[in-house]
């Protein structure tokens, strides 16, 4: 995902994905997740990834918290 700060934590098929970028501006939580799932879907289908928790926000949202 261009211009995003991405941190992935976890192991054994269970991961936390934190992505921060303006790509998420104006999108609902579901639309944000769909962007990430498009990237991860191949690995989910193969069984490499079993569970994903996502923290997806814009730079502005990160600075507000």
Image: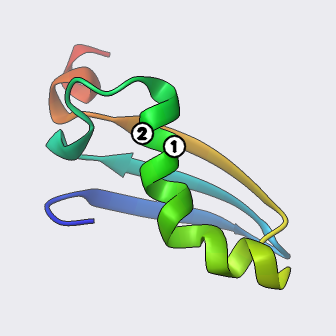
From the viewer's side, name the closer residue of 25 and 55: 25
- For the residue carrying disc 1, how many other residues have a C-alpha within 10 Å: few (<14), some (14-19), or many (20+)? some
For the point 15% across and 41% down, the residue is 22
Residue 23 picture quarter = top left
Compared to 29, does 7 lie above or below?
below
Q: Position of residue 31 (x, y in %)?
A: 44, 36
Direction top: furthest residue: 64
Compared to 34, does 12 lie above or below?
below
**In the image: residue 55, left or right of residue 2:** right
Residue 48 seen: no
Compared to 37, does 33 lie above or below?
above
Labels 1 & 2 near each other (Cβ < 8 A): yes
3D distance between C-alphas at marks 1 and 2 = 4 Å
**In the image: residue 52, left or right of residue 55:** right
Q: Position of residue 27 (x, y in %)?
A: 31, 27
For the point 26% across and 58% down, the residue is 5
Q: Position of residue 51 (x, y in %)?
A: 80, 57
- The numbered disc on residue 41 is none
For the point 27% across and 37% down, the residue is 24
Query: Which element carries disc 2, helix, strand or loop?
Result: helix
**In the image: residue 20, left or right of residue 53:** left
Residue 51 seen: yes
Residue 42 picture quarter = bottom right
> Which residue is identified by label 1?
33
Query: Which element carries disc 1, helix, strand or loop?
Result: helix
Q: Position of residue 25 (x, y in %)?
A: 20, 30
Number of numbered discs on residues: 2
**In the image: residue 42, left or right of residue 63:** right
Quadrant of the snapshot with the N terminus? bottom left
- For the residue carrying disc 2, how many other residues have a C-alpha within 10 Å: few (<14), some (14-19), or many (20+)? some
> Which residue is identified by label 2?
32
């Amino acid at each position: 995902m261009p211009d995003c700060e991405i941190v992935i934590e976890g192991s054994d098929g269970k991961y936390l994905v934190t992505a921060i970028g303006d790509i998420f501006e104006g999108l609902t939580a579901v639309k944000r997740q769909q962007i990430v799932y498009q990237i991860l879907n191949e690995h989910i289908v193969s069984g490499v990834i079993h569970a994903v928790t996502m923290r997806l926000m814009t730079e502005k949202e990160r600075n507000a918290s």
